[in-house]
């Protein structure tokens, strides 16, 4: 009996200790603090994003107008040039010789004209004295006219030879930036060559080319209630996100929209014009056009607060018991990579989780919701 009493007391003590230990463990593992926000309505400005290709306002292929070997390249790739600046020099020997030959032909023609003129004057005097016949006098006049025609032809050949000589000096037709130079000193250049000597891009202003779908264009014109020109005139300025993710400092304006829908892609080509005073934008580079879109009195949530299951979007709302609830939502079809405009599934005043979605937070999980602005300092990295 004494042993039984001792064992009973030991069991009771052990039970009490276990119960106390469990209570301590529960106290040591409280509900985790999770950042949340309370959604409300506001005006939203999101951006429609479209991949774009940038081209200079004028990309001019530089081709020689005569055939000759390149004797000197005066510029380098990527160099800024002014209108009229020297780019290439072609071999001038044969063209100088052609000018000299044409000059000689002109002198011969001038001599022939002078001789014919003397003969005609003499024949005229003799004809007036009835010494020669009119036929002989007319022959002298015709010889003079023929000599004058030959002199005109020689002068035209001289002009052409001098013009060809000037073509051996290739200059820039506009301000711009020099492109690649595939042919160097010693290469044969001709007007029919497959590749141009170079390309000069006028980059003071650039065009960003992108595409709009047929649905986008119908939306711009309110399904045809206004003209496309009116829609373009009322469109807001657009932004350009560069290839490195940074925003270009100046806004642009949509200039034209192609009047033809490509049957293969179902889209039309659009051209936006940007000023480029610094010359940073180069022809051939890429970027993303961002067209702002405004919605009034809508619910906006960060994209990181959402997760997807079978192509449907969900958020974790927090109920009155501070437990998470998986809630399906629908969003507007504009994706700026940062936020969503919610069209259904949430109402103003709902509390949603914005931290640990898709990783630590699960459905039905008890949490200690804290305001996102209060959570930021707690989550900041320590400086110690």
Image (spheres, rainbow, N blue to C red):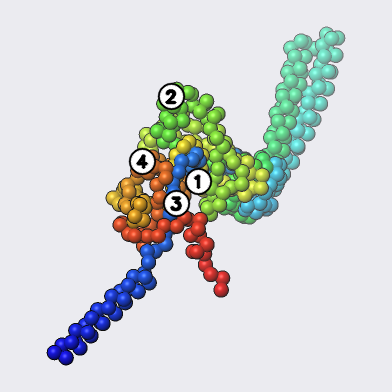
- Residue 265 is left or right of residue 309, and the answer is right
Mark sitting earlier along the chain (3/4): 3
SS under mark 3: strand
The residue indicated by pointer 3 is 37
The front one of 286 and 290 is 290
Residue 170 in view: no
SS under mark 4: strand
- Front: mark 1 or 4: 4
The residue indicated by pointer 4 is 344
- Is 264 placed above or below 225 here? below
The front one of 269 and 380 is 380
Q: Residue at x 85, y 14 (%)?
A: 125
Q: Quadrant of the N terminus?
A: bottom left
Mark sitting earlier along the chain (1/4): 1
The residue indicated by pointer 1 is 288
The front one of 223 and 187 is 223
Classify 10 Å Cα crowding around label 1: few (below 14), some (14-19), many (20 and above): many
Mark sitting earlier along the chain (2/4): 2
Q: Quadrant of the C terminus?
A: bottom right
Q: Position of residue 192 (x, y in %)?
A: 55, 42
Mark sitting earlier along the chain (2/1): 2
The residue indicated by pointer 2 is 224
Q: Position of residue 15 (x, y in %)?
A: 24, 79
Q: Residue furthest front?
A: 1
SS under mark 1: strand
């Amino acid at each position: 009996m004494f042993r039984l009493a001792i064992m009973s007391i030991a069991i009771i003590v052990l039970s009490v200790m276990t119960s106390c230990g469990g209570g301590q463990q529960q106290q040591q593992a409280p509900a985790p603090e999770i950042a949340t926000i309370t959604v409300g309505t506001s005006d939203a400005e999101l951006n429609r994003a479209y991949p774009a290709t940038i081209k200079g306002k004028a990309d001019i292929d530089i081709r020689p107008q005569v055939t000759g070997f390149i004797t000197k390249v005066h510029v380098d790739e990527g160099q800024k040039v002014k209108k009229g600046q020297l780019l290439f020099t072609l071999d001038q020997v044969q063209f100088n010789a052609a000018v000299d030959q044409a000059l000689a032909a002109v002198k011969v023609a001038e001599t022939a004209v002078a001789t014919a003129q003397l003969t005609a004057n003499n024949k005229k005097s003799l004809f007036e004295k009835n010494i020669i016949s009119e036929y002989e006098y007319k022959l002298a006049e015709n010889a003079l006219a023929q000599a004058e025609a030959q002199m005109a032809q020689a002068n035209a050949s001289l002009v052409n030879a001098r013009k060809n000589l000037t073509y051996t000096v290739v200059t820039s037709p506009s301000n711009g930036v020099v492109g690649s130079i595939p042919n160097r000193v010693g290469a044969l250049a001709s007007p029919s060559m497959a590749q141009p000597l170079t390309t000069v891009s006028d980059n003071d202003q650039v065009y960003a080319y992108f595409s709009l779908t047929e649905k986008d264009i119908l939306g711009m014109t309110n399904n045809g209630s206004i003209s496309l020109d009116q829609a373009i005139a009322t469109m807001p300025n657009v932004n350009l996100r560069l290839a490195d993710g940074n925003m270009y400092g100046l806004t642009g304006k949509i200039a034209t929209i192609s009047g033809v829908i490509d049957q293969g892609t179902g889209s039309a080509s659009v051209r936006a014009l940007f000023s480029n005073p610094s010359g940073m934008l180069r022809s051939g580079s890429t970027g993303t056009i961002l067209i702002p879109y405004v919605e009034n009195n809508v619910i906006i949530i960060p994209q990181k607060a959402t997760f997807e299951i079978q192509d449907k979007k969900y958020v974790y709302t927090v109920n009155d018991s501070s437990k998470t609830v998986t809630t399906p939502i629908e969003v507007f079809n504009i994706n700026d990579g940062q936020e969503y405009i919610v069209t259904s599934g949430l109402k103003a005043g709902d509390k949603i989780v914005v931290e640990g979605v898709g990783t630590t937070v699960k459905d039905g999980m008890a949490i200690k919701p804290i305001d996102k602005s209060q959570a930021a300092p707690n989550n900041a990295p320590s400086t110690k």
